[in-house]
Amino acid sequence: MKFSSIVATAVVAVSIPVVAAAAEWRGWNIHVEDYPNTVALDQFAAELAETTDIKLQMFHGGVLGSQPDAIEQVRNGGIQVGQFNLGPMGPIIPTTNVVSLPFIFNDVPHMFRAMDGDVGKVFEEAMAAEGVVPLAWYDSGARSFYNSERPIMTPSDVEGLKVRVMNNDLFVDMIAQLGGNATPMAFGEVYQSLKTGVIDGAENNYPSYESTGHFEVAGFYSISQHLIIPECLCVATEAWEALDADTQAAVRTAAQNSANTQRELWAEREAASRAKVEASGVKINEVENKVAFQELMAPVYEGFIAANPDLASVIEAIQTTE
Ligand code: GTR
C-alpha cells in the first residue's frame, strides 16, 4: 500500500460521521420576552428542532447588538437568523428603502398583499443577493409619533421637536419636511434619551411604545400612521445555501408558521398595548388631517426617485397593488 492511500484511508476512517453534523445557528431579536415576535421566533426554533437538524439558539432583547450591527453580522456570518424591520436595512440594501417611504402603503392589509405577492419577490431577491434571505413577513403595524411636549394635530406641531428615528436618511428627511430635528439612534437608547430630554419624542407602533416603557416618559401619542414597514424573519444567505432542498423547504414552512403566529399575536398585542398606555394616562389623539402630512412628503419621494430612478417602477407596483 502506498503512503498516500494509507493517509487517505485513515482520514476517511476518522472523518465520516455516523450522522450528519447538525447546524448550530444563532438568532438575533431586539424585543422582550413576551413580545409577539419573540414568541413567534421561539416557535420557529422549536419547529426547526423537530423537523430539521438545525439547532437555533435565539438571543432576545438585542443582546447581540443594535439592529444595524445585527444586519451586518447576518451578512458576514456571525449570526444566521435575524428578525429585522426593513427600515434600518435601507442604507445597506437600497431597494428595501421603497417600503420606508412615508405613506407608501394605504394600510397593513395593503402592505401584506404587496409583500406576499409579486412585489415581495423584488425585495426577496435584492436582499438575498446582499446576504439576507427573507423567509416570511411579520406584522409591525403602523408607526405614529409620540413625544413629551404636546399632542401633534397638524404638521406644524412637529416644528422644533427633537425626534428619534431609525437609522436611515429617509426618516431624517421625513422629519425635516415637517420642521422637526431628527436624530437617528439605536432602539435600546431611546428610553434614556427621552427621560433625560436628549430627544423630545420618537415614532413607533403601540406594542413597541408600550413594551419599551417609552409611554412612561413621552405621554402624547398622535396617530399619524406615517410608516407601515414590514418586518422579516431572515436567514443568512450563506447558511441558507448550505442547506439541501428538503431542509430549505422545512425551514420555509417553519418560518411561514412562525409568521402566521406572529400576525395573530400582533393583533391582540396592539389592542392590549393601546389599552395599557391609555389606562396609564397617555393622551392619544388622531392627527387632524393625515393628507396634510402626506402632501409634505412629496419632496421625499422626488428626491428618492431622482437618486434611484430604477426603483420608480417598484413604487408604482406597490401603489397599483389592489
Ligand atoms: C420596532 C421594530 C424593531 C425596531 C424598532 C425601532 O417597531 O419591531 O425591529 O426597528 O421598532 O424603532 O428601532
Image (tube, grey):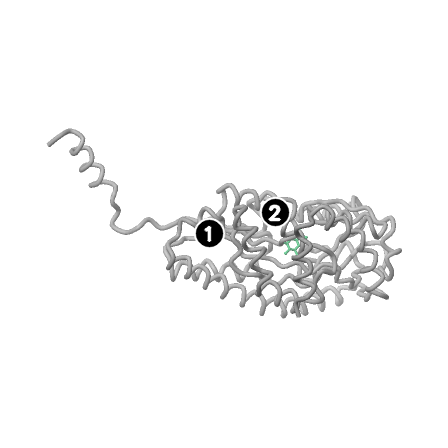
Quadrant of ligand 1 in image: bottom right
Crowding near the residue tagged with mark 1, few <14, some 14–19, many ≥20 C-alpha atoms within 10 Å: some
As shown in the figure, which amino acid type bears the numbered disc 2?
Ile
Q: Kindly identify the residue that appears in the image at 54 percent across and 57 percent down.
A: 233
Q: Position of residue 202 (x, y in %)?
A: 75, 52
Which residue occupies the foreground of this view, 269 or 2?
2
Looking at the image, residue 132 sits to the left or right of residue 212; the answer is: left
Q: Amino acid at mark 1?
A: Gln
Q: Is residue 20 above or below residue 254?
A: above
- Residues 82 and 317: in front is 317
Assign the N terminus to one quadrant of the image.
top left
Q: Pointer 2: what residue?
A: 93
Looking at the picture, does residue 320 appear above or below residue 208? Answer: below
Of the 4 image quadrants, the one containing the C terminus is bottom right
Answer whether residue 59 is visible to the viewer in this image: no
Residue at horizontal 75 percent and vertical 64 percent from the top: 280
Secondary structure under the numbered disc 2 in the rendered image: loop
Q: Quadrant of residue 270?
A: bottom right
- The disc at residue 57 is 1
Q: What is the CA distance from the residue labelled 1 to the residue labelled 2?
A: 26 Å
Q: Is residue 40 left or right of residue 222?
A: left
Residue 29 drawn above or below residue 317 = above
